[in-house]
Amino acid sequence: MSMATLIYSLCALVAGLCAFLLLRAWRASRYRLLLWTGLCFSGLTLTNVLLFLDKVVFPTIDLSPARLVVTLMAMGVLLYGLVWDAQ
């Protein structure tokens, strides 16, 4: 296992853990900022999984446009939650 494989895997696992903890806290408290942040981290987890697939599993296929779209959508969810859903 190369160092890049380890780092990409750990990044995806940490982002997934953050998403899980944020969404679990939202379910307990119903504080909406936790929901938007948890959804954003879910998108960032998907971005990290796509990065792993792009660099390790399919090095000849360029998945960077898909990664950028998913990241933009994740940040858009967080931006919506911070700006338009503020209470």
Image: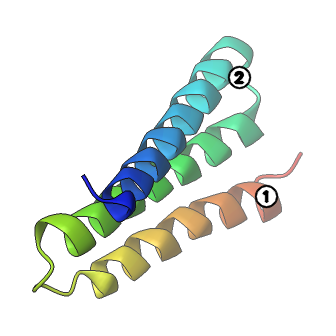
Residue 3: which quarter of the image? bottom left
- Per the image, the residue denoted by label 2 is 30
Q: Position of residue 32 (x, y in %)?
A: 72, 36
Q: Position of residue 30 (x, y in %)?
A: 71, 22
Q: Position of residue 23 (x, y in %)?
A: 57, 29
Q: Position of residue 75 (x, y in %)?
A: 60, 67
Q: Residue at x 79, y 58 (%)?
A: 82
Marking on residue 14: none
Q: Residue at x 76, y 53 (%)?
A: 85
78 left or right of 53 in image: right
Distance of label 1 from label 2 (alpha carbons): 15 Å
Q: From the viewer's perspective, is residue 81 above or below residue 87?
A: below
Task: Determine the secondary structure under disc 1.
Answer: helix
Residue 48: which quarter of the image? bottom left
Q: Earlier in the sequence, mark 1 or mark 2?
A: 2
Asked whether disc 1 touches disc 2, contact meaning CB atoms under 8 Å apart, the reply is no
Residue type, numbered disc 1: Leu
Spot the residue most to the front. 2
Spot the residue most to the right. 87
- Per the image, the residue denoted by label 1 is 82
Residue type, numbered disc 2: Arg
Q: Residue at x 89, y 45 (%)?
A: 87
